[in-house]
């Protein structure tokens, strides 16, 4: 399927690993220009160069830390300057920091979640939108979590901030739709990503199985997660959805909050 992204420019916050890097791969394969935005140049530069060589595409690494005021603004200016335009933004950054209930979460915990999730997303969107609008419109995809619809007590800080991201995205869709900007939220389920590696290794040691098989078993027996497909998701499967939403193929889809969780129920 031709996604219609050839020669368009996309910025991916959190693009140096996991779902972000897999999304960058898909876009580069389709002929898009891609900016990987992350905090670690030493890790990001080789990955950008590898994608550029593999697909003969314009893929570059840009350094920014969304928890720092002004950092995203500088990065997006640089991206738009290098590529001559910016057609889309995908924000995949933000991991689970701690498992605590309301009475366990202190002010420092709440502030850390707020900065790492809400403000990273807000700053990235606020910095990118003027460039996207200047290009005649484009697309925004932000990342929340399936758990905003399936609350669990020890994930209060995480799910509260992810719910806020979904609301910010809906507001962007409503506010900037007349300027040809589409904005959607993806809510991944339990995904085999770098942040899940430790849990997968623990499961592998416990059950004496390869990591993916072990985590699928642990998902049912230890975590009591009722997933219709009976397995953990892959970052490439989330990337497929990200790339579709960023593309012309999703041209009439905006303001949506989409679960991609294998059919998770609690």
Image (cartoon, rainbow, N blue to C red):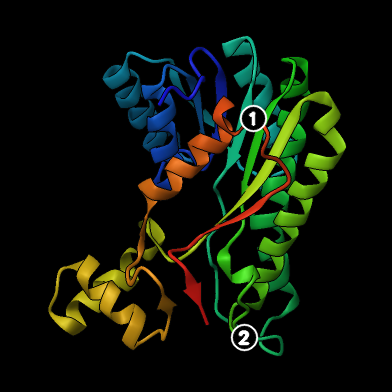
Q: Does residue 48 appear to the left or right of 206 in the view shown?
A: right
Say which quadrant the N terminus sits in. Answer: top left
What crowding class fits label 2: few (fewer than 14 Cα within 10 Å), some (14-19), or many (20 or more)? few
| Residue name at image x 51 percent, y 41 percent | 242
Residue 137 picture location, percent across and down: 73, 22
Residue 259 vs 242, above or below: the answer is: below
Q: Does residue 9 appear to the left or right of 156 in the view shown?
A: left
Local secondary structure at mark 2: loop
Query: Can you tell which mark lies on residue 251?
Result: 1
Identify the residue under disc 2.
153
| Residue name at image x 56 percent, y 19 percent | 9
Residue 66 vs 35, above or below: the answer is: below
| Residue name at image x 35 percent, y 19 percent | 52
Q: How many marks?
A: 2
What crowding class fits label 1: few (fewer than 14 Cα within 10 Å), some (14-19), or many (20 or more)? some
| Residue 11 placement: quadrant | top right
Regarding residue 184, the answer to whether it shows in the image is: yes
Q: Does residue 63 appear to the left or right of 120 in the view shown?
A: left
State the residue lying farthest toward the left. 208
Foreground residue, 62 or 220?
220
Q: Does residue 263 appear to the left or right of 176 in the view shown?
A: left
| Residue 158 placement: quadrant | bottom right
Regarding residue 38, the answer to whether it shows in the image is: no
| Residue 84 placement: quadrant | top right
Query: Can you tell which mark lies on residue 108?
Result: none
Residue 217 picture location, percent across and down: 26, 79
């Amino acid at each position: 399927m031709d996604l219609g992204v050839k020669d368009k420019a996309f910025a991916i916050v959190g693009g140096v690993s996991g779902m972000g890097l897999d999304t960058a791969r898909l876009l580069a394969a389709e002929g898009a220009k891609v900016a990987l935005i992350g905090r670690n140049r030493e890790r990001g530069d080789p990955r950008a160069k590898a994608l550029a060589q593999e697909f003969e595409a314009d893929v570059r690494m840009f350094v920014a830390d969304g928890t720092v005021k002004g950092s995203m603004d500088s990065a997006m200016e640089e991206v738009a300057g290098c590529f001559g335009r910016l057609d889309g933004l995908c924000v995949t950054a933000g991991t689970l920091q701690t498992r605590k209930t309301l009475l366990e979460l202190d002010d420092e915990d709440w502030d850390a979640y707020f900065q790492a999730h809400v403000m990273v997303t807000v700053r990235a969107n606020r910095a990118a939108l003027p460039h996207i609008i200047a290009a005649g419109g484009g697309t925004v995809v932000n990342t929340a979590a399936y758990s905003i619809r399936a609350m669990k007590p020890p994930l209060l800080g995480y799910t509260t901030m992810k719910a806020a991201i979904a609301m910010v995205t809906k507001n962007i869709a409503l506010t900037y739709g007349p300027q040809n900007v589409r904005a959607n939220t993806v809510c991944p389920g339990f995904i085999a990503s770098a942040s899940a590696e430790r849990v997968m290794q623990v499961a592998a040691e416990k059950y004496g199985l390869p990591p993916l098989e072990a985590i699928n078993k642990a998902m049912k027996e230890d975590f009591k997660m009722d997933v219709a497909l009976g397995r953990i998701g892959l970052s490439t499967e989330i990337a497929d959805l990200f790339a579709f939403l960023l593309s012309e193929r999703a041209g009439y889809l905006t303001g949506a909050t989409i679960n991609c969780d294998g059919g998770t129920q609690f």
